[in-house]
Image (cartoon, helix red, strand yellow):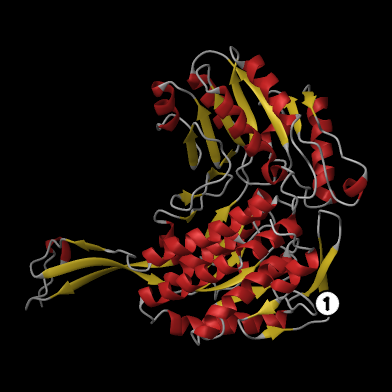
Amino acid sequence: MEAFSPSQILESLQLNGTIHGTSTGQKWMQNNETITSNSPIDNLVLGSVSVTTKEQYEAVVSAASEAFKTLRSMPAPKRGEFVRQFGNALREEKAALGALVSLEMGKSYQEGLGEVQEMIDICDFAVGLSRQLYGLTIKSERTAHHMMEQWHPLGVIGVISAFNFPVAVWAWNFALAVVCGNTVVWKGSEKAPLCAVACQHIWNKVATANNLPEGISSIITGDYTRGEWMTHDERMPLISATGSTRMGRIVGAQVASRFGKSILELGGNNAIIITPTCDLKMTVTGALFGAVGTCGQRCTSTRRLIIHESVYDKVKNALIEAYGQIKIGNPLDESNHVGPLIDQDAVNAFLNTIENVQAEGGTVLYGGKVLEGGIYDDGFYVQPCIVEALNEYKSVQKETFAPILYLLKYDGDVENAIAIQNDVKQGLSSAIMTSDVREAHIFLSESGSDCGIANVNIGTSGAEIGGAFGGEKETGGGRESGSDAWKAYMRRQTNTLNYGKDLPLAQGIEFNI
C-alpha cells in the first residue's frame, strides 16, 4: 500500500478538526459531548466525535421521513443511478477508506480493502436490482378479474452496525434500502465512529451532485441508548441490527412489541467438518484464514474444527505449523497477517475463555498469550490460540469474539460430524472439506447443516454479496445482501382488478339484495 500516515488517512476523508457525529447529509449537527476514537493498533487518538442528542435525533428522523416522500416517488432505476454514483465514489476512495477501516478497528489493510470492495459490489448489485424489484401476476378465480402482487417502499430504515465490519454491513443495507425507495438512519459502532462519518462524507458528494434532499442517508453517534431510541421509534418500520445475541434479544423484542420488522445478524459458532478425503492444503488455508482473519472478530470466523479421527493428527500438526508462520503486528503493514483485537475488553474475554476451557478439560496446543514489547505494549495484540476440546464444553458452546480455534474429534460417518456441528445454539456459517460427493450432498441436504450458509471445500469466513447473508437459531434469522433479501426492505401488496361489468364474490359466495 501507499505509505499513508494516520494523519493523511484522516485528512483525505475529511476527518481532521472538529468531527460531528450527527448528519442528515450536508447538514451536520454539533454537540459538546464527544466520544474518542482510539486506534487498537497503538492506542493513538484518532479524533473525537460529537454524540447525538435526543433533540438532534428527532431532527434526523424528521428529515429522513420527509426525504422518504420524495425518494419513494422516484423511478427505481433513477434511485439505482444514485447508488451507481455512490459505488464510483467509493472506488475513488477505496484505498483511503480501506486504510481507515484498518486504522480504526485493526483488521489488515487487505481486509480493509476487501470490506470497501464489498460496498462497491453491493452497489453494483443494487443498480441491477433497481430495474427488477419483480412482483407477480396471479390468475384469478373470477371472470374478468386480474390479480397481481407488487412491492412498495417501507419508509425510514434504521441500521445498527458493529465494529468488526464498520462500513460494509451498513452499505449492504443502504444500497438495497435506497433502490427500494427507503431512506436510512445509521447508528455505527461507537468503537469505530470515524468510519460512519467518512461514509457520510462520500455519500454527500453524490447527494450534492444530484441535488438530493437532506435525509436520504443520515448518521447518529453514541452508545446503546441511541439504538434504543431507534428500536422504540414507530417511524422506523424496519430495524436492521448486527451484533451479539444478547443485543439481538433486546432489539428483536422491542421492535416486535410495536409490530415493527427486524433483520437480525447475530452470533456465529461456525465449524468446518474435515473428513478423511479432505485436501489438506485447502483445509489448512481455509481454517487458518477463517480462525485468525480480523483477529477472530468476524461473525463468520471459524470457531470449531470437527476432524475425523483418521486424519486428526495430520490436520492438527499442519495447523500448528501454519500458526507458527503467522505474523502479528501493525495491520497497515502488509507483511503482517493479523492485527490487534479491538480493545482491552476483547483481550480479557480471550484470556478468560482460555482459562475457562482449560478448567473444563481443554488442552492448549498453541498460543493463547498476550503479546508484549514494542507496538504490542500500546495495542491489543494476542497470539491466536488452538485448543483441543469437546463440543459440550460451555466455552465451546458460546461465541468468543477472539482468535480461539477448538479442535474436536469425530469417528464414523459424516452424519456424526454434522450432529456435532449442529449441536450449538448459533447457526450462521458452516463448511465441509471432502472429496466424497455423497458426503458433500448429505451436508447440503435437509438433514445436513442447519446454518444459513453451508460451504463445500471453502472455509466459513467471508461471503459473496450475490447470495443472501444470514443464519438461523440464535443468529437471528435475518438475511442481508444478495438473492431476494431486498424484499425485507419493502412491503408486499396484493391487488385485484375487476375489468368486467359484474361484481362476483370470491369463493362463489352469493350476496343478493
Instruction: Tell me if 329 is positioned left or right of 189 in this view.
Output: right
**Residue 231 is drawn in which quadrant?**
bottom right
Residue 404, position as x, y percentages in the image = 73, 35
Query: Up-down: is 364 above or below 290?
Result: above
Q: Decide which of 399, 173 is in the foreground and name it.
A: 173
> Could you tell me if residue 392 is visible in this image?
no
Q: Decide which of 103, 250 is in the foreground and name it.
A: 103
Q: Quadrant of the N terminus?
A: bottom right
Q: Quadrant of the C terminus?
A: bottom left
Residue at x 64%, y 51% (from the top left corner)? 111
Query: Up-down: is 325 above or below 503?
Result: above
Q: Secondary structure at mark 1?
A: loop
Q: Decide which of 92, 232 is in the foreground and name it.
A: 92
Instruction: Tell me if 195 is positioned left or right of 431 in this view.
Output: right
Residue 218, position as x, y percentages in the image = 60, 76
From the image, tell me which residue sits under label 1.
33
Type of amino acid at the residue the image marks with label 1: Glu
Residue 88, position as x, y percentages in the image = 51, 69
> Could you tell me if residue 379 is visible in this image?
yes
Crowding near the residue tagged with mark 1, few <14, some 14–19, many ≥20 C-alpha atoms within 10 Å: few
Residue at x 52%, y 62% (from the top left corner)? 120
Query: Up-down: is 462 above or below 491?
Result: above
Query: Up-down: is 199 above or below 339?
Result: below
Residue 61, position as x, y percentages in the image = 59, 80
Residue at x 53%, y 23% (from the top left corner)? 279
The image shows a total of numbered marks equal to 1
Instruction: Tell me if 244 is positioned left or right of 372 in this view.
Output: left
Residue at x 52%, y 47% (from the top left corner)? 463
**Residue 402 is drawn in which quadrant?**
top right
